[in-house]
Image (spheres, grey):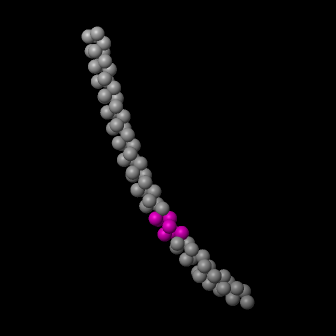
């Protein structure tokens, strides 16, 4: 009797739970791939923003120099 119950539980697990675990693993891999792509994109954006910040700082220095020259002429 106990063997029948154990066998039925094994069948139930194989039929119901294992397929769900497979689906969860597949979805996890898909989410992980999307997350890796998203992180790469964020890294690219951060690099771009750092470059823009350096350019802005350079322009600020140039503008200060021009303002100082114009102020001296006035």
Instruction: Give left or right: position of 30 versus 5.
Output: left
State the extent of the magenta-drawn residues as a range: 24-30
Residue 21 in the image, given as x and y percentages of width and height: 55, 72
Residue in the foreground of this view, choosing between 48 and 2:
48
Residue 5, placed above or below residue 39? below
**How far across and how far down the image is residue 37, in percent?**
40, 56
**Looking at the picture, does residue 39 appear above or below residue 55?**
below
Query: Which residue is depicted at the point 47% across and 65% down?
Result: 29
User: Where is residue 49 drawn, in percent x and y?
Assistant: 38, 40
The vertical placement of 34 against 51, above or below, is below
Image point 46% across, 65% down: which residue?
Answer: 30
Q: Position of residue 17 (x, y in %)?
A: 60, 76
Q: Outermost residue, right direction?
A: 1
Front residue of this view, candidates 18 and 52: 52
In this orientation, which residue lies closer to the viewer: 67 or 53?
67
Quadrant where the N terminus lies? bottom right
User: Toward which corner of the image does residue 9 lie, by quadrant?
Assistant: bottom right
Q: Main secondary structure of the magenta part?
A: helix
């Amino acid at each position: 009797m106990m063997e029948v119950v154990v066998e039925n539980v094994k069948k139930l697990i194989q039929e119901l739970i294992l397929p769900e675990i497979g689906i969860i693993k597949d979805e996890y891999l898909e989410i992980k791939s999307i997350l890796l792509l998203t992180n790469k994109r964020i890294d690219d954006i951060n690099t771009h923003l750092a470059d823009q910040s350096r350019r802005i700082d350079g322009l600020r220095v140039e503008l200060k120099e021009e303002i100082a020259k114009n102020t001296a002429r006035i």
